[in-house]
Image (tube, rainbow, N blue to C red):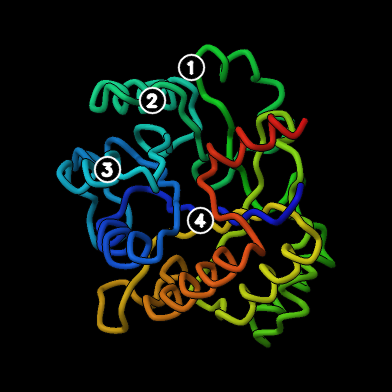
Amino acid sequence: MDKAIVTITFDDGRRDNYKVAKELLDRYEIPATFYIVTAFIENKKQIGKNGPLSREEMEFLVNNDLFEIAVHSDYHTNDFNDIRVGANKLRDWYKNLDELGFASPHSEMDKDQVVENKELWKELNIKYVRIGNNFRKFYWPEKIIAKLAKMTKSKLLFRLVYRSSFMDTTNDYALVCVPIMNENTFEQIKSLIDSAVKLKKWVILSFHTIGFPDDLGYNSMWCWDYYKFEKLCQYLSELKNNGKLSVLTAMDSVKKMELLC
C-alpha cells in the first residue's frame, strides 16, 4: 500500500445517519458505508431508540457517489436466508445495486465462518463480509487492556487493543473493524488513525448512532457525540488533502486491495 486507508461505516440504517451524511460527510467529502437492516427500514423491526431512515433519506445515500449501501440482513441476524432476503430487498429497491458488501450483525461471524462460506457469498454476489474487531475472540489479557482503555481513556492502551485490526489485504472476504463506542475519545481514535498512517495500513471504524447531548439514547453504548464526529471528519479531511491517507468506502477499499494483489 502506498498510504493508509480509513473506512467509516454505520450499522443498521438509523435515522441520524442521514443528518450526519448530509451535514458532515457530504460537507467534508468523506465517503462512508451504510449497512442496512431492511426490516428496520420497513418498520417491521425495532433497533435503537431513534427510528430508521426513511426511503426518501435512503435515496439520498444511494444517489450520492460518496456513499455505499450494503447488507446487514433483513431482521438483523446471521441466518443465511435472512442475509439473502436483505440483499434481495436492497436490489429490488435500488436497481443500480449489484455487488454488495455485508456486515455480520453483532459481529458474530468469525473469519473461519466467512471463509467456509465463500461459495454462498459468490452466489449472493456479496463481495466482502465485515466482522468484529479481531479474527479470534479476545484472550483475557486483551479483555483487561480493553477495559482499562475504556476506564482511563488511554490512547496507548486503545492502540494496543485495536492495532490488531489493521489490514493490508482483504483476508478471504473477511474485513475486520474497530467498534467505536460512547466512551471512546476523539484523541483515542486520532491516535489509532495516526498509527495506521505511519504503518500504511487500512482501518475500518464502525459507528452506529451519532447524537447530540439532548438526544434520546445519547448515553447508550453505541452512540458517539456529534461534535466529536465532526472533529473526526475535519481531521480525516485534513489528512486526505495533505496526501497522508485515502478515505474510501469498504467496497472501494476491497477493489483497491484486489488491484494491489
> Residue 92 location in percent, x, y?
26, 21
Please give the residue where the numbered disc 3 appears in the rendered image: 40
The residues tagged by marks 1 and 3 sit, at their Cα atoms, a distance apart of 21 Å
Amino acid type, label 3:
Phe
Answer with mark 3 or mark 2, whichever residue precedes in sequence.
3
Answer with mark 4 or mark 3, whichever residue precedes in sequence.
4
Please give the residue where the numbered disc 1 appears in the rendered image: 124
Q: Nearer the viewer, residue 126 or 63?
A: 63
**Which secondary structure lies at badge 2?**
helix
Residue contact at pointers 2 and 1, CB within 8 angstroms: yes
| Nearest to viewer (mark 3 / mark 2) | 2
The C terminus sits in image quarter: top right
The residues tagged by marks 2 and 1 sit, at their Cα atoms, a distance apart of 8 Å
- Relative to 179, is 11 on the left or the right? left
Q: Nearer the viewer, residue 246 or 44?
A: 246
Image position of 184 with respect to 259: above or below: below
The residues tagged by marks 4 and 1 sit, at their Cα atoms, a distance apart of 24 Å
Q: Residues within 10 Å of mark 1 (few under 14, many from 20)?
A: some
Q: Residue at x 77, y 79 (%)?
A: 156
Place residue 115 in its image quadrant. top right
Amino acid type, label 2:
Ala
Q: Residues within 10 Å of mark 4 (few under 14, many from 20)?
A: many
Please give the residue where the numbered disc 2 appears in the rendered image: 87
Answer with mark 4 or mark 1, whichever residue precedes in sequence.
4
Answer with mark 4 or mark 2, whichever residue precedes in sequence.
4
> Residue 234 location in percent, x, y?
47, 74
Amino acid type, label 1:
Leu
Please give the residue where the numbered disc 4 appears in the rendered image: 8
